[in-house]
Image: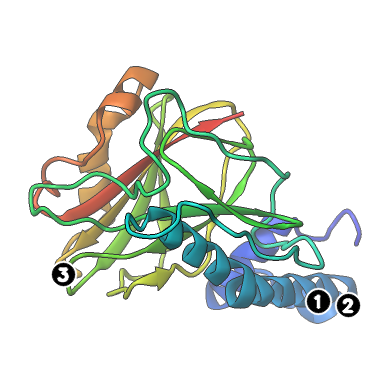
Amino acid sequence: MTAGCPSDLALEAYLLAPERSPLKAHLDACEACRGRLALMRSEGDEFRQYVFPATVDAVREAAAPARSRWVKWFAPVAAVTAAAAAALLVVRVAPGGPGAGYVGTKGPKEGRAGLQVFFAAEDGARAVEDGGIVPASARLRFSVKPDDDHCFLWIASVDAKGQISRLFPPVGAPVEDRKAGPVPGGAILDGQPGLERLFAVCADSAATTWDDVKRAASPAAGSEETLRRVRALGAPLADECQSSLLLEKR
């Protein structure tokens, strides 16, 4: 790897949308970066195939009222998952927050997008609860379990500085009807301590745009007080199935 080689973040963006990445020429010429890319792809496949499903199963088991509240965590993986790894941290719930079964807030349609958020370390993935503490530069993965038959999925984040960020689908990609389960790709937090709220919206159709999401999310932006208070998006998305989750970045 040389000074002219792309960052890990740029390579992750290439994995998400190679047809829109400007890195093809560099990768064709750089054996070292092709090796980095192959390792990231392999470790990402391992995460999706083994670590992520095991974590989702454990969270669902913990949330089931008729079953034991004990969660048996899976065995450690062999290597850090490059596309979804962060420093090992045991996530706690902020005082007054809900328990492990929390997956977001109900909207006017009495539906939920069933948003679940995970970050990974050498010993496996960790579920993030509402109000949970995460590393400020954590790499996140998402899963949804929508109540509705259709889920044209948008995932956005809002921080106390007023920044509204598009997490899914990637910029330039069309919105798509998602089924329950892991969401492709992920997100990397900005490294700045503070609060950040994630919103997942399952729209009824592809007619809902990113501009609609930004407009609905704007009341939550601008202060930690509003991030704690605004737990669902309003107009023009008030009638859509949705969930939200608050993160404390440290």
Circle 3 sits in a helix, a strand or a loop, which is it?
loop
Q: Nearer the viewer, mark 1 or mark 3?
A: 3
Mark 1 residue crowding within 10 angstroms, few (<14) / some (14–19) / many (20+):
some
Specify the amino acid type for callout 3: Ser
Specify the amino acid type for callout 1: Arg
Mark 3 residue crowding within 10 angstroms, few (<14) / some (14–19) / many (20+):
some
Question: Where residue 63 appears, x then y in whole percent?
Answer: 38, 54
Mark 2 residue crowding within 10 angstroms, few (<14) / some (14–19) / many (20+):
few
Q: Quadrant of residue 206?
A: bottom left
Specify the amino acid type for callout 2: Glu
Q: Which residue is mark 2?
A: 31
Numbered-mark total: 3
Residue drawn where x is 20% and y is 65% of the image: 147
Q: Which residue is mark 3?
A: 205
Circle 2 sits in a helix, a strand or a loop, which is it?
helix
Q: Which residue is mark 1?
A: 34
Gap between marks 2 and 1 measured at Cα: 5 Å
Choose the circle earlier in sequence order: 1 or 3.
Answer: 1
